[in-house]
Amino acid sequence: IQTLSGPVRIERLSDSDSGIIELKLDRPEAKNAIGKEMLRGLQNAIETIGNDSSANVVVVSSSVPKVFCAGADLKERKLMSASEVQQFVNSLRSTFSSLEALSVPTVAVIEGAALGGGLEMALSCDLRVCGEESTFSLPETGLAIIPGAGGTQRLPRIVGRSAAKELIFTGRRISGKEAVSMGLVNYCVPAGEAHHKALQIARDINQKGPLAIRMAKQAINKGLEVDMPSALDAEEECYDQLLETQDRLEGLAAFAEKRKPSYLGK
Ligand code: CO8
């Protein structure tokens, strides 16, 4: 896999972890704030991962200590006209939607601050793991805007409308412990251990039938957007796509032979 450099890097792990891709935010001077260059980096990284059929799971993290992402680059934004802001935010929206739409699971690792657009990026991932010293907030209303890169829609779908409204109306910063108690993150672990925990989860996912994981993600995501009968149809369609796969037969053979399955993704 191509290793992208600049404020966004991607790296593939090796050997038995080779289906795991790391996407790392690395703009220390601005606490990973998302400006134009960072946005381009994210777009390239997501496109590269989307075109890589051997990727099975993506871990999204920060290389900068004590911060996941400080949100939109407020210094760059101050210099933009309203139409430039609109264009930028539109690109940010579609970038987060492409992240969400990756066919493979994504796990965000939060150690430190996940604020504004930074939290919206984490909300576009499938799972979130944080360190205890993390803080989460959507401070946009304090800046006289609203979370406009998916925050008003993805947050209530994850934590429920009441909790989401309180966080968005007040901009309150919450801790990792509170985040896990409201279901905003899947796990809150001691500070510094979130990446390790996310890798454990990624390894578990990477052992499973790769096509099954893709179909499970697709069935869940499609189903949540539609009524129940259509959702069950979506599940059936995804299930049916696995019936003719070699991996399904391998799963049955491995069970009968009491060994670990060896999946090929076909
Ligand atoms: N943009 C630009 N620069 C930033 C940002 C940012 N969001 N955040 C931090 N920086 C810069 C600081 O200005 C500082 O630069 P300098 O050294 O030149 O003074 C440098 O990063 C280090 O920052 P701190 O000294 O503040 O570092 P700390 O470790 O003390 O604190 C924090 C780190 C907690 C991240 C703190 O910097 C902070 O609170 N930042 C502001 C975060 C914020 O308010 N983000 C929300 C932005 S709004 C948003 O994301 C909306 C996006 C949705 C798009 C849709 C809109 C319609």
Image (tube, helix red, strand yellow):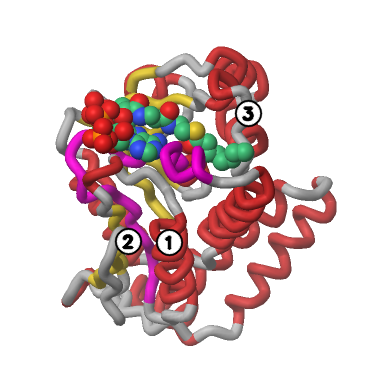
Give the SS element for disc 1: helix
Q: Which residues are magenta?
A: 55-79
Dot label at residue 42: 1
Closer to the N terminus: mark 2 or mark 1? 2
Residue shown at 48% from the left, 22% from the top = 182
Q: Nearer the viewer, mark 2 or mark 3?
A: 3
* Position above or below: 244 against 214: below
Q: Amino acid at mark 1?
A: Leu
Residue shown at 42% from the left, 72% from the top = 49
Give the SS element for disc 2: strand
Quadrant in the picture for the N terminus = bottom left
- Residue assigned mark 2: 8
Closer to the N terminus: mark 3 or mark 1? 1
Do the numbered discs 2 and 3 sit on residues whose CB atoms are within 8 Å?
no
In percent of width and height, residue 151 lies at 59, 36
Mark 3 is surrounded, within 10 Å at the Cα level, by few (under 14), some (14 to 19) or many (20 or more) other residues, namely few
Does any atom of ligand 1 lie closer than 8 Å to the CB of label 3? yes
Dot label at residue 141: none
68 within the magenta span: yes
Do the numbered discs 2 and 1 sit on residues whose CB atoms are within 8 Å?
yes
- Distance, label 2 to label 3, CA atoms, is 26 Å
Does any atom of ligand 1 lie closer than 8 Å to the CB of label 2? no
- Distance, label 3 to label 1, CA atoms, is 23 Å
Q: Quadrant of residue 219?
A: bottom right
- Distance, label 2 to label 1, CA atoms, is 6 Å
Dot label at residue 145: 3
Residue shown at 45% from the left, 37% from the top = 74
Q: Nearer the viewer, mark 3 or mark 1?
A: 3
* Position above or below: 119 against 105: above
Nearest the eye: 123 or 94:
94
Image quadrant of ligand 1 equals top left
Residue shown at 51% from the left, 18% from the top = 171
